[in-house]
Amino acid sequence: MRKLVLGSLIAATLTAAALPAAADRVDFYVNVPPPAPRYEVVPAPRHGHVWVPGYWEWRGHRHVWVGGHWVRERPGYVYAPARWVERDGRWYYTQPGWGRRHDSDGDGVPDRHDRAPYNPRYR
């Protein structure tokens, strides 16, 4: 079970790192670091849904845990989980959300590597 959770966290981190620059917006910052992430049991995969891992959200004047949950999959988009990044003693928060996948024809090959990015029969 631990391997499943660890694998999910690694996958979420890699997915977040691969999102386009538009998804790297910072919503705000605070001077209080978030607590350590809580351990969550990731349920079995659900067809047509994406698992959103739990995260610490800033509400008012404190961090509040938002538990993991399923969201309906959006074709052509990748889900970016919430992130906290520390820079110069401040903690910058980016809200979770959807970013474009940059695979126009849905063949699994990113447009930048696709010989025919608008034709799913050619790669």
Image (spheres, helix red, strand yellow):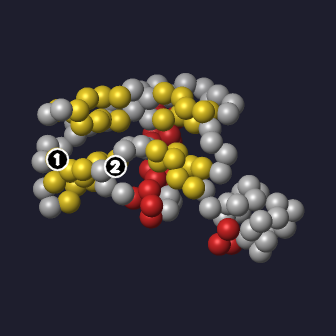
Q: Looking at the picture, how far across and down is residue 25, in whole percent? A: 36, 57
Q: Amino acid at mark 1?
A: Val
Label 1: how many Cα within 10 Å (few below 14, some 14–19, many 20+): some
Q: Which mark is residue 30?
A: 1
User: Which numbered disc, 1 or 2, marks the residue that appears first in the sequence?
Assistant: 1
Q: Which mark is residue 94?
A: 2
Q: Is residue 34 left or right of residue 49?
A: left
- At 37% across and 44% down in the image, what residue appears? 95
Quadrant where the C terminus sits is bottom right
- At 77% across and 65% down in the image, what residue appears? 118
Q: Is residue 70 left or right of residue 121?
A: left
Q: Amino acid at mark 2?
A: Thr
Residue 67 quadrant: top left
Q: Is residue 51 above or below residue 31?
A: above
Whether residue 79 appears in this view of the structure is yes
Q: Looking at the picture, how far across and down is residue 83, in whole percent? A: 35, 47
Q: What secondary structure is found at the residue carrying circle 1?
A: strand
In this view, the residue in front, 65 or 42, is 65
Label 2: how many Cα within 10 Å (few below 14, some 14–19, many 20+): some
Q: What secondary structure is found at the residue carrying circle 2?
A: strand
Residue 66 quadrant: top left
**C-alpha distance separating marks 1 and 2:** 12 Å
* Extreme residue toward the right, this view: 121
Q: Which mark is residue 108?
A: none
Q: Looking at the picture, how far across and down is residue 34, in whole percent? A: 22, 40
